[in-house]
Amino acid sequence: MNNSSHISPETLADIVEGRATSETLELAVAHISSCSDCVDTLRRLQHVILTMKSDTSKDAPRDVLQSAINIFSPETQARFRHIVAILTFDSRLAGPAYGIRSVRSPSRQLLYSAQETDLDLRVTVQNDECIVAGQVIRADCVSGLVEISGDSGSATANLNEVCEFTLAAIPVGMYSLRVKMPDVQIEIPELELKD
């Protein structure tokens, strides 16, 4: 019990579950006989504890519980957005520019759009290996990391001060590319690198 005019909820829970000492129980019974507030609290605790003991439902899976807990964590609320980029231009699909002398560029240009962010990629193939370079174009471009991964290999590179990057050479194949910045992750889930 405590020094206030009512019995603490902890003490009442101990009484309901049979953990209270005989002295505490004797003092509580004397107080409860004249205090309707403590009687009400005791009855509610008895109901809750009885309901908990008779509950036969199974616990939710661990991953579901962790996901529910993470919804309310400050890190999750401040977490970045995940955006899938959409291809808006591919230089290999563009028609010929009549009236302009030119040769086919050794690099393929791909432009992707992801809400307020654009991604300009240059893919150069040499000896069955690809070098992917590019730039993230957005109003508030900040530091970030670019990752490319697939069955044939993977590579990473940091964005420089003007949000440009060059990845190490990787074999031709199918890849996914991700640009991770503090507030957003932009993903190109299927990026086919070939000549």
Image (cartoon, rainbow, N blue to C red):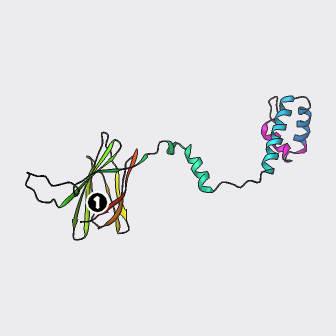
Q: Is residue 24 left or right of residue 86?
A: right
Residue 187 screen position, x and y as percent: 38, 53
SS state under label 1: loop
Q: Going 35% across and 62% down the picture, which residue do you hit?
A: 175
Q: Is residue 169 left or right of residue 26?
A: left
Q: Going 35% across and 53% down the picture, which residue do you hit?
A: 145
Quadrant holding the C terminus: bottom left
Question: Residue 13 appears in which quarter of the rendering?
Answer: top right
Q: Residue 3 colored magenta?
A: yes
Residue at the extreme bottom of the image, as rendered: 127
Q: Going 10% across and 56% down the picture, which residue do you hit?
A: 102
Question: Residue 32 appears in which quarter of the rendering?
Answer: top right
Q: Is residue 137 left or right of residue 102?
A: right
User: Which of the pair 95/88 is nearer the observer?
Assistant: 95
Question: On the image, numbered disc 1 is attached to which residue?
Answer: 167
User: Which of the pair 46/89 is nearer the observer?
Assistant: 89
Residue 96, relative to residue 12: is it above or below?
A: below
Q: Going 36% across and 43% down the picture, which residue do you hit?
A: 115
For badge 1, the amino acid type reads Leu
Residue 5 screen position, x and y as percent: 82, 28
Q: Residues within 10 Å of mark 1 (few under 14, many from 20)?
A: some
> What stretch of residues is rendered in magenta?
1-22
Residue 62 screen position, x and y as percent: 62, 56
